[in-house]
Image (tube, rainbow, N blue to C red):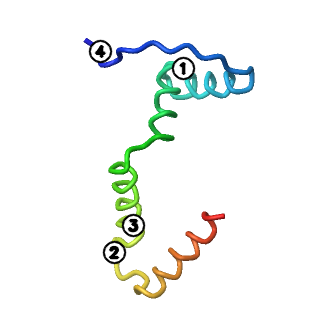
Amino acid sequence: MSGLERRLQILLDQERHSLVESEAARSGRSVAAVIREAIDLRFASDVAVRANAAAAFLEATSDEGGPGEDWADTKAAMESDLERRVP
């Protein structure tokens, strides 16, 4: 039995519907699955947000391929990235 228990009806303007429909076709999923994913992304739990941040941090600071930047360079790059993202 599916964990989906509630039915929701929404009205979308043509532009939003086209966007969702295009993504569904591109990804091989249903329109409903695309909308559920959008809801999950918008209302991600605090645990998921922290896990994603930790994964991004570990990826950015990995030493694959030999010695990388030192901590000062890495920190400066991260601060610069943060300044670009925060209005």
Chain-order first, disc 3 or disc 1: 1
* Distance from the alpha carbon under mark 3 to that under mark 2: 12 Å
Left or right of 34: which side holds 10?
A: right
Q: Nearer the viewer, mark 4 or mark 2?
A: 4
* Labels 4 and 3: the sequence-earlier one: 4
As measured in the structure, the alpha-carbon distance from the residue carrying label 4 to the one carrying label 3 is 35 Å
Residue 3 quadrant: top left
Q: Which residue is tagged 2?
A: 63
Residue type of the residue flagged with mark 3:
Phe
Left or right: 10 with respect to 72?
Answer: right
Nearer-the-camera pick, 85 or 10:
10
**Residue 57, which numbered label?**
3
Name the residue located 35 percent from the left edge and 71 percent from the top edge. 62
Q: Are marks 3 and 1 in contact (CB under 8 Å)?
A: no
Residue 67 to residue 82: above or below: below
Q: In the image, what residue type sits under mark 4? A: Ser
**Which amino acid type is marked by label 1?**
Val
Q: Which residue is mark 4?
A: 2
Q: Residue furthest left?
A: 1
Q: Is residue 4 left or right of residue 36?
A: left
Q: Judge by depth and name the residue closer to the eye, 61 or 63.
A: 61
Amino acid type, mark 2: Asp
Indicate which disc residue 31 carries.
1
